[in-house]
Image: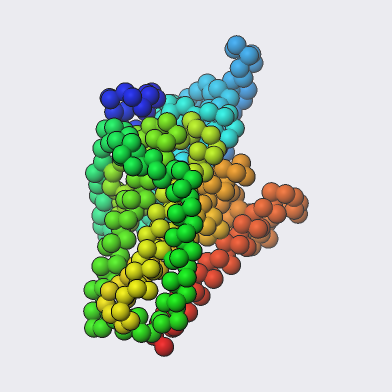
Amino acid sequence: MSDLRTSSTPTPPRRAKLELLVRPANNAEESFEVREIGSATAFVQSRPQRLASGSFELAEGGSRMAGQRHFILKNTTTERYLMLTEPEKFLWEQMDGRTSLQEIATAYVLRYGAFDFDVIPNLIRKLQRAQLLTLTPSSRLRQALARNRRQPVVKAIENGLTVLERINISSRNVQRVFTAMYRFGGCLLFTRAAVVVLAALALAGLAAGVKLWQEGGDIVAGFGGHAIRAILMVKLLFFFTVATHQIVHGLALVHYRRRVREFGFTFLHGFVPTFYVDVTDIFMASRRARVVTAVAGASVHLVLGSIWFIVASLSPLGSFTQAFAAASGMIQWQAFMIALYPFCFIEMDGYHVLVDVLGVPTLKQEAMAWAGALARGRAPRRFGRSEQLFALYVALSALSVAAFVAFNVMLVLHASS
């Protein structure tokens, strides 16, 4: 990755590209292939995994240089040796195949109080040369496909997803654009007046939503015989509001005098189309800045949902306009809840705020591993503070997902009654 430059520098940063060694699941020769990952997915999808414990040895060096500890990492298969600093050793220990690069970077900030954009890719290149790193598929779908890659249909699907993953429409010369948007009105989003307006809109939207709930059946009737087309239109409109969500994240970076490194469009996990903004520079700001950046983007859905609910409440009862506005408001508010609510097994803005406050960047992975061990009867007898946190996260997330599903079922039944 390129060195950090000030926001006044017109030259865009080089796109962050990581080269990782990938071991094919059905490769009997244990060989590797190099896969390059662009910054669009590097901090979201990539989950580097160190080799199994029997494949390497780690020992502390016999002396300290300039007061710094150093360690020797050996690949027992290739007889390759690497010297690691203490921060590099910390990063190496995070590469367990479950922790994403974004979470690894967060853990680094919480541990050392700063973030160097070069430290992770430089370490990965060192590990790559020593064949100490593999890359696990990011989603369960990709993991399932990798396990069944020998079947022609499965391999064709996986190849198709790989092609989609490589689709990336983006620009790295966006700092000036975001700075201009901030100066010409974007700065107003980060004032006390904006908070007051947000609260007022939320209350008005809530009141409108309660009123619409009482008229549920009549509202849905407004779609008439065009329900499928209307729902597709609602989904398409929502898709473009995701871009607004990301733009506000970028404006928050400008507000805290940090740099927007990239903005663009890609396919998350190979099949989910989405917009993204590279906000890694926020690691150089305070915790408050990171929290505000996360909340600001999600608040877009609260504002839009409230506006749609108000429009629906003012529209003629049973009209297409009312049905369309009500459906749009509901999907926006659900997006707001999913983005900010941390207990739903999804690593969205609210989850990142939670782990930042708690100082546990790998909360979900550790909690799920603990729950899995508990289900298999292998969980340790100790039930300390960490285990209590894991149990609370898993319990609240399970209950929240169940409540979310139940609410949507109830919503459908209410609308059809």
Q: Residue at x 31, y 50 (%)?
A: 243
Point out the image quarter for the C terminus.
bottom left
Q: How is the image coloured?
A: rainbow
Residue 216, how many percent across, how many down? 40, 81
Q: Residue at x 31, y 23 (%)?
A: 9
Q: Residue at x 42, y 49 (%)?
A: 297
Tell which of 40 and 413 is nearer to you.
413
Q: Residue at x 64, y 54 (%)?
A: 390
The number of callouts visible is 0
Q: Is residue 211 above or below residue 376?
A: below
As drawn, the residue found furthest toward the bottom would be 417
Q: Is residue 216 above or below residue 390?
A: below
Tell which of 34 and 64 is nearer to you.
64
As drawn, the residue found furthest toward the top would be 66
Residue 56, how many percent across, how many down? 54, 32
Residue 396, how many percent across, how many down? 61, 62
Point out the image quarter for the N terminus.
top left
Residue 411, how many percent across, how many down? 44, 78
| Residue 9 in view | yes
Tell which of 236 and 297 is nearer to you.
297
Lateral position of residue 372 relative to residue 278, left or right: right
- Residue 72, quarter of the rendered image: top right
Lateral position of residue 301 relative to residue 383, left or right: left
Tell which of 389 and 19 is nearer to you.
389
| Residue 336 in view | no
Lateral position of residue 198 relative to residue 394, left or right: left
- Residue 332, quarter of the rendered image: bottom left
